[in-house]
Structure formats: C-alpha cells, structure tokens
Image (cartoon, helix red, strand yellow):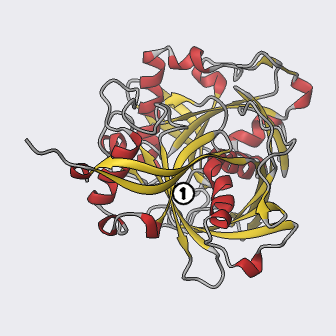
Amino acid sequence: MSHAPQVKVPAVYMRGGTSKGVFFRLEDLPERCRIPGETRDRLLLRVIGSPDAYGKQIDGMGGATSSTSKTVIVSRSASAEHDVDYLFGQVSIDRAFVDWSGNCGNLSAAVGPFAVTSGLVDPARIPQNGVCHVRIWQANIRKTIVAHVPIVNGQVQETGDFELDGVTFPAAEIPLEFLDPAEKGEEGGGALFPTGHLVDQLEVPGVGTFDVTMINAGIPTIFLDARDLGYTGTELQEAVNGDAAALARFEAIRAHGAVQMGLIAHVGEAVTRQHTPKIAFVAPPASYTTSSGKVVQAGDIDLLVRALSMGKLHHAMMGTAAVAIGTAAAIPGTLVSRAIGQAKETVRFGHPSGTLQVGAAAEEIDGTWTATTVVMSRSARVLMEGWVRIPADSF
C-alpha cells in the first residue's frame, strides 16, 4: 500500500500584536499554490489543521481560536510606492474554508519585520541603526499600511520594553499607520459609512431592533450599545462565550448587519463569511478587573469596548477593529463617540485584557465623513522558523 509523502514548505511562525500566524513568502509556496484558488486554500487549511470537528486543530499549526488560526502570504510589490504586498487568510476552525474578506490588524505588525528578515525589502531602505519604514500594500482591502520597524546593527529589533495588554511579555514597539482606512474593495464601495448614516436602526427578526453604527474602516464593523444587549461593557470572555444563546443572537445581528452594509445579499451567506463584518459593543468608562487580574480604573480610559471575532468574544481587541474604534471615536454622533461623551481623535479604550490607545484623523467634506490616518502601536516576534510539512495529497 502506497502513502503520500510529506511536502516541506519554508515558513515562519510569528506573533503579531495579540495574534499568531504562519507566514509564507509567495515564492516559497508550491507553484500551483502561488495563485488564489481552491488548491492554495486546501494547503493553508492543512497547514493550520482545519477543518477539525473536535475544534482543537491538533494536527496543524492553529491554536483553535480566531487569534491563532491565521495565515499570511507576503511578496515583493510590483508597485514603486510599496515594498511588499501582504495577503491575509483567516482559516475557519471547523469548516473547510479560508476567509479572504478582510485584514488582520494584529498580524499587520509582523509583516514589516517578516519582510525585512526575509529579504523582501530593498537593502538600501534598511538603516544600520534606526527605523525602517516598510510600505505595505494590504491586498485584501487594497490599502496602504506603513510599519515603522526598529533596526539595530542592521537587524530587526524584536525585544524591548513595550508592553501590550493581551501579550504576556514585553517586546519592541512597532507603530503602524493605516492610511485612508475605509475599504475600497468591490464590496465596500469606498464609503466610510456604507448606509450613509452615522446611526441606523437594525431589525433582527426574533432578536430585536437596535441602534447601530456600521462603519467600514480597517474592517467592516457593527457597533452596538452594551446596554441594549443587557451588558455593562466590563464583560470578560466567559460571560459571553459560555452563553450559547447570546452567541446565537450576536451571529444573527452580525448576519443582518452584513446585509444592511451591502457585504452579502442574504443572511444565509454569513456562515461562509466569518471574518467580516466584526461586531462590537461599547459603553461609557467603568472600573473593571481584566482577565489577568489587573484593575483598570474608569478614570484611565475613555470608553469600554468588547468585540467578537469568528463567533466568540475576543480575548483582547482585533487590530482592525481598533482602527474602526479610533475612526468612529473621532466622528461626532456615532455610538462610539456617544459612549465617550464627545468626539476625540485619540482615545484609550478598555478591553478584556487591558487597554489600548488609538488615534485617528477624520474630516467631513460636503456632508460626507472620510478618515485619512489611524495610528496605533503593536509588537511582533518570530516564534519559530523553518518548514511546515503537509501531506502531498492534501492539496
């Protein structure tokens, strides 16, 4: 009886922000996987260990959470304005599909360091000591991200004293600039507020009718008022993820919101689009204890935000959702700025693991709001490098 051999593919396992993922250079993928399609998706699914009916991803590199079931493909950019092109794939844990509909803001922090160490950035752009400004084309949402990567002795500096809530150990700070963050893909249409309104009424049959802010910045996001859901905004993961009925309500809200945002044609399509849109609820500041036991004082934050990713409350905050939070906070009249009590260009919000600061610049032109830049800091680190092995008959 013959058995398929394993194929070795060069890869790097990296942490970026509060996420982890398997990174590939496009040129290192098997030739038939260098173009989008079913073959590439099957390879990535097998790398991560999906679909897994047990929900554990034991036979792959995934960590069985939305934050750790991720893949990244990076290549030299054909554009003179960018150094690299970055493509993000959110791998479903229990279903056989890869969601390419959005970006990962956390792993965006690792793209710059990966590009430098993988030889994808022109050596002339890398200082011996200082900061390398890596110009990234985010291919999923067709946007520019600039990663400011610290360099020491010609090498990426990974260690440091920058602390990021949700990550146990400190590391080097990597500021990220998300330029003109409203998506301009075929689905997003380029509108910051897809419905044209800062606040909409969203009717969800069998669940209720809610005030929502639906924004398309960083990643399509639906914001709700925590009080309308019976929450305070201080909840930790177990308060939501242990409540199957609550998760079903959130998914129903997300699906109907996706239709109203024009992302899908009918609610049944939401099951194959788990990565976008995100759903989050906001509340005014209040003191609470984080998942690590640290106390966050109400006076140290501008608002509370809790967000769901891939059907579960996130342990911290998705980077792309932070872009949406910062943008909505800068615009008067959104549910986010209402929770603050005013519009602010720089806000610090509380999430289950601690706090995060994000800054945004937005302006209103002829009655239409646009966002120009969103800035926040993350960190990144190589965890392992070498090869991943995949059975040759799996893709």
Q: Is residue 248 left or right of residue 158?
A: left
Q: Quadrant of residue 284?
A: top right
Q: Is 79 placed above or below 175 here? A: below
Residue at screen point 37% across, 68% down: 34
Q: Is residue 336 visible?
A: yes
Q: Is 130 placed above or below 287 here? A: below
Q: Going by the picture, which residue comes out furthest to the right?
A: 299
Of the residues shown, which amino acid type is indicated by label 1?
Pro
Residue 166 in the image, given as x and y percentages of width and height? 71, 32
Residue 236 in the image, given as x and y percentages of width and height? 65, 19
Could you say whether the residue bearing mark 1 is in a helix, strand or loop?
A: loop
Q: Is 364 placed above or below 391 here? A: below
Q: Is residue 178 left or right of residue 348?
A: left
Task: Name the one closer to the observer, 129 or 187.
Answer: 129
Q: Quadrant of the N terminus?
A: top left
Residue denoted by label 1 = 194
Task: Name the one closer to the observer, 390 or 131.
Answer: 390
Task: Name the one closer to the observer, 106 or 216.
Answer: 106
